[in-house]
Each structure stands twice: as structure tokens, then as C-alpha cells.
Amino acid sequence: MSTPVNLSAAAAVPSYLDGAWCTPSGASHPVVNPADGTTLAAVTHATAADVDRAARAAHNAFLDWREVPVVERVQPLYRYKALLEKHLREVAEILTRENGKVYEDAATEVKRGVQMVEVACGMPSLMMGDSLSEVARGIDCETLRQPIGVCAGITPFNFPAMVPMWMFPFAIAAGNTFLLKPSERVPMTPTRCIELLYDAGLPENVLQLVHGGREVVEALIAHPLIKAISFVGSSPIARLVYTQAAAAGKRVQALGGAKNHLVVMPDADLPKTVDAILSSAFGAAGQRCLAGSVLVPVGEVAEPLLALLVERAAALQMGNGLTSGVTLGPVVSHDQQQRVLRYIDSGIQAGASLLLDGRPEHATQALPPSGAFVGPTIFDHVAPDAAIAREEIFGPVLSVLRATDLDHAIRIVNASEFGNTTTIYTQSGKAAREYQQRVEVGMVGVNMAVAAPMAFFPFAGWKRSFFGDLHAHGKDAVYFYTEQKVLMTRWF
Ligand code: NAD
């Protein structure tokens, strides 16, 4: 059944629709390597008619798949884990080529995806209900969890392997069938991942891969056979998908963008803190929803912290993420590069002090020609109302807002309209605990580089970083992809 996907230059990236790898009926778009501007492949977008065909096929597949015992449903996932591990280098290299992140980051992403598969393999235990006998005289009560039907996932460009795996392993292990619409900017990685899933023996149409953009998303939201939508992307689109899908009567979880604060107390371990900030702010070229993008030094730590940070950031090695020794790859596209450069200009115009200038014309390193590079950029004395202090830039740009004390730092963090993650750097348990308790943010780290919850915990953004009730992965995913039923029994 599985057709080898030829991911060499200029190859066509197929969709998997209605039991076959195929080219859907929409327009074709190039997939570009952001490190050098070369075209890697072409992807053809699906249309609303393709989505309709896929949704009907998924519904038919669901009628059989939900009858397969859960212990059998997870067997392809066990084999999938092994296949992903076997092909880790290949998948990570594809990911670096189309997304730009450095190979080590890409490999870590794939491993994080594998952990999602591992947790979903525990579905026989995770789906268990509760029971209590004699809730009344001669009456027993139990709950059970059943799959909800055809589910759809819409994913962003920045984690093309892992974010789809926040969704489909849990959904299909729970007995649902799934339509995945990955980011049209990075279609090759999810295609290879889904091909491996079918190599692992997944029955036909339990998962379909529908490439495309807005038209596909709108068709998924409107389709009556689709019962639940999982979305990850920017906040404006997350909000749109949440409101439209909820209005269409669907269960929705929509994870949005972020502006994450890193608070450094005067007693922080400076070298270790700088290591963590470099990784948080500039890892994956700042294109993580958990990237630290606002640095809040408290009191007198600002001067020594910024001196060391600027020195270390300037030494990051930029280039193609497949070249060994490179620690900072390009941003995802030339459009994204221009967007980040506009934010840097806006910071300068707003009067912030540019401590480190990442604009390509100021680069001190030789960069591959035609790449979408932006160097590490640090602004000090940023006004709290400046765009670079408030808006998600999604690039290697760090804005510094100085605080006088912990209370001031917490006020800065809580003024943000986003609430995805934050980290405090301190050696004081008292300060850390106060911070954890008072910040209005869903994922809080202490002395962490990136406080990314593992697969068995939820990915718990707050405020404009999340629209919905049940979050991605962990037990929330089990609850999201199942419907609960309560049984009461009396025998005469
Ligand atoms: P995006 O919002 O542009 O796109 C996400 C998905 O939505 C893609 O599949 C895209 O095709 C689709 N889409 C885009 N415009 C649409 C429209 N008008 N109507 C319907 N669908 C549309 O996001 P992106 O640039 O691919 O990804 C980066 C964003 O994702 C950042 O904001 C980042 O913070 C966020 N993100 C959030 C999390 C999280 O867990 N909260 C994780 C990863 C990424």
C-alpha cells in the first residue's frame, strides 16, 4: 500500500486521501529550503471536494476502527515508534532542510514526537473508566470512554514532526480516525512521518494526510462528519478556528502564539542562566512557541547579565543547520525574515537600545547566499508598550524590560495578553514559589531553558495562547479525543 515518497529535489509531495497516496486537485506550491533559497519539492493543495472525499472515507474507516480492541489498535503505534527511531536521522534531515532549524534541534523534535507515540501506546490504561458498586441498593455505576469519530488536526510550520504527534497518536489509539492538515510551508516532514505510520501497518484511512492552506481548513471546519478539531498556530488564526469550529458544533482545542518572559533574579547562577537564555531565545531561531522573547532582569543583575549574554550570543555560529558546528539556522522563509527585520526597525524607531544587531547587513559571519538569516538581536531599555515588548515576533529577537523587584517583574509578565510559558532564574525557593503562584501563565519553569511539558503532562498555555478547555497531550488528550458515558445497572 505504501508508495515510497521521493523527497529528492523537485519531487512532488503527495497527500494520502481515500486509501491512496495521490496528488489532490488544487494548485501546486514550491517548498523552499530557507538556508539557501533552493526549491526542494512541490506540494499540491487539496480542495474542499478532496476534503469531503477524505472525511467520508474517514467516517467509513471509523465504523470499523472503533470496533478494533484498544490493545490491537495500539500495536501499529508500537511498530511506529521503532520505525521512527530507525529513520530518525532521515526525518530530522528532511526537517532541517525545509524548516531551517539545526539538525540537533530537529532530531530532538523527532524524539519528542516519539515520546507522544509511547504515551499513546498506554491507551488501554489511559482510557479506563471508573466504577463503583452499590451506588444505591442493588445498583452499580461505571463510566466508560468511547471515541468521538472523525477528528482533524491543523498544525504550524515550526514543529512539523512533533506537533502532529501531539494529536494523531492519541486520537487514533482512542479509536477515532484522523485527518491531518500540516503547514503548507513544511509538508515533507509530516508526509514522511505518515508514510512510516502506514509502513507500521496502520489500516487504510485511519489517518489521512490532506495538504493545503486556508481552503482546506475552512472545509474541515464546515464538514458535518468531522467531530473535533485540534489546531496549533498563531493566535489570530487559533481564535478564528476556535470560534468557527465551536459555532459549527465541534469540539475544539486551539493553541495559539506567545510572548514569553524570562525573569532573572539578582541571586541567579549567571553562567547557567545565560546558557538557558541563549537556548530559549535563539534556539530554533526564536521560532518556538516556548521561546523566551522578553528578558526581565531584576535590580542590579542587569549589567553583568547583559554583558555576558551579548558576548555569548554574538558567538553563536550561524549557517545551514546541516553543517556541523552551526548553532543558529535561518528563519523559515524570506517572508518571515522580512517580518522579523521590520520588528527590528520598529524597535530602533521606538528608541530601544540595540545591544546586538542581527540584521544581515551587520553580520560579522559569512552567511550562505540567498538564505533567510537573522542574527541574534538584543534590545535593552524597551518601553513596555513597544511592539517588540508586546507582540509575537517569532524570530531571534530578545527585548529587555528591566524590573526593580520581583513584584515589578510579575506585573510586567501579567500585563501580557499571552500566557504560554515563563521561567524564573533564582537560587531562592521563596522567590521561585511566589513567582510560580502569582504569574498568570500556564507553563512555568524554574531555572529551565525551555519548560516544555513531557508527553504525559498537558501543554497548558493560558490567555491568548490557548482557546478551549482540554489541552494537547497528557490526560487532556485522552479526554479530548473521547466521549464519556455513564452506565447505571440494576439486575432483578
Ligand atoms: P499560522 O497560524 O500561520 O498557521 C497555522 C496553521 O493554520 C497552518 O496549517 C496554516 O495553513 C493554517 N492557516 C493559516 N492561515 C489561515 C487562515 N487564514 N485560515 C485558516 N487556516 C489558516 O502559524 P505558523 O506561522 O505556521 O506557526 C507559528 C505560530 O504557531 C506561532 O504563533 C507560534 O507561537 C504558534 N505555535 C503555538 C504552539 C502552542 O503550543 N501554543 C506550538 C507551536 C506553534
Image: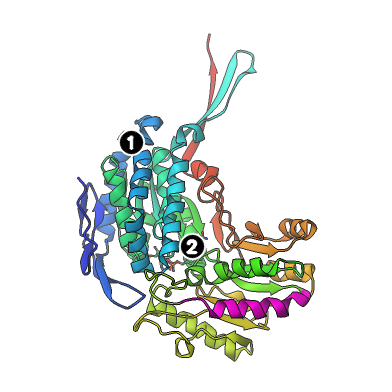
Q: Is residue 173 found left or right of 274 in the rendered image?
A: left
Choose the circle earlier in sequence order: 1 or 2: 1
Q: Position of residue 395 (x, y in %)?
A: 50, 75
The reply to whether residue 281 is in sight is yes
* Residue shown at the point (46%, 65%) measured from the top left: 237
Position of the N terminus, as image quadrant, is top left
Image quadrant in which you'd find residue 7: bottom left
Q: Circle 1 is placed at which residue position?
A: 65
Instruction: Check residue 68 for magenta coloring.
Output: no
Q: Position of residue 459 (x, y in %)?
A: 55, 53
Label 2 lies in ligand 1 vicinity (Cβ under 8 Å): yes
SS class of the residue under badge 1?
helix
- Count neighbours of disc 2 (C-alpha within 10 A) and say few if under 14, some if 14 to 19, many if 20 or more: many
* Residue shown at the point (45%, 84%) measured from the top left: 365
Q: Nearer the viewer, residue 364 or 192?
A: 364
Q: Give the residue at the far top of this rendering.
A: 492
Q: Circle 2 is placed at which residue position?
A: 238
